[in-house]
Image (cartoon, rainbow, N blue to C red):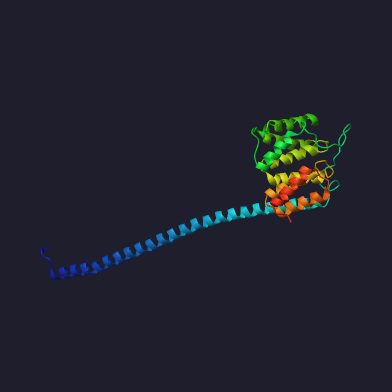
Amino acid sequence: MSKFITAAGFAAALLVGASATPAAAGTKDDVRALQDRMARVEQAAAAQSAATVRLGELERQNQFLTGRIEELGFQLDQANQRLDAIAAALSGGAAGEPGATAFVGGPGFQQQGPVALVPGDPIADQLSRDGVQGGAGAVSGDPASVELPLDPTAAFDYASGFLLKGDYQQAKAAFGLYVEAFPNHPRTADARFRLGEIHLALGENADAADVFIAHIRSYPNDPRAAEAYLKLGTAFSRLEKSDQACTVFKTMKAKFPNVSQPVSQRADLEMSRINCQ
């Protein structure tokens, strides 16, 4: 075999080299095209990821707004129920209506008004002062530890004992249990009234309004009925429900023209403060 490249062989080599150059160039173009496509895919993926995050945020906002709407709807229902109860109470509705409690006692009991714990009822005075100031008791025990005695008289004294100590939270729990346990006892009217006063003293004005509405409907002839109207109006005044408060105060004056001077003066003061016409 000849050690020299023939002319034909040299020409063939040139043809091979010439054909390889375009192939390499095409491969580079393919790589660049692939890189461009990958870049576009990455951009699209990033955009999709951002959209997913935004969608998640929108879903959370929607859930929050839905919950808020449901909460406001519930509050509106409560407000409507309260207004219906007020209308019934102010129109004179009481015993015989759904939800009203007859003021009767068991054997040996006589219908009676609220009983002062001590002469002068300093607890009522203290509750009134705390209610005006929106304060609370100096002592605060665990309401869950309240265990009401089975005897109604002992139970009332037990609940009142927390007031004597200034423990409004436990007193609230005890009087609440009393109202549930002894709905027809003669002292339940006083227990309910005390419960309303405690709510006022703690600044729980909506709860106070509910309790005094129930008191007015259940015990229209109670010796403290006029004062219940006064405290109901006070609760609405603190809730910035001036129209309702004025209506309650005016109704009190119309229903109880001979109300005691302190109650009448306090109503006049409250009416002046919220500009009742």
Residue 191, placed above or below residue 28: above
Residue 271, placed above or below residue 45: above
Residue 44 screen position, x and y as percent: 43, 61
Q: Quadrant of the C terminus?
A: bottom right
Which residue is the extreme one toward the right? 107
Instruction: Give the image quarter of residue 19.
Output: bottom left
Q: Which of 68 and 219 is in front in this view?
A: 219
Residue 6 screen position, x and y as percent: 13, 68
Q: Total marks drawn? A: 0
Q: Nearer the viewer, residue 213 or 72?
A: 213
Residue at 29% across, 67% down: 26
Residue at 72% across, 37% down: 125
Q: In which quarter of the image is the N terminus?
A: bottom left
Residue 74 in view of the camera: no
Residue 190 screen position, x and y as percent: 79, 37
Residue 232 screen position, x and y as percent: 74, 47
Residue at 73% across, 41% down: 196
Residue 108 falls left or right of residue 150: right
Residue at 29% across, 64% down: 28
Residue 35 in view of the camera: yes
Residue 233, placed above or below residue 169: below
Q: Nearer the viewer, residue 133 or 272?
A: 272
Instruction: Give the image quarter of residue 198.
Output: top right
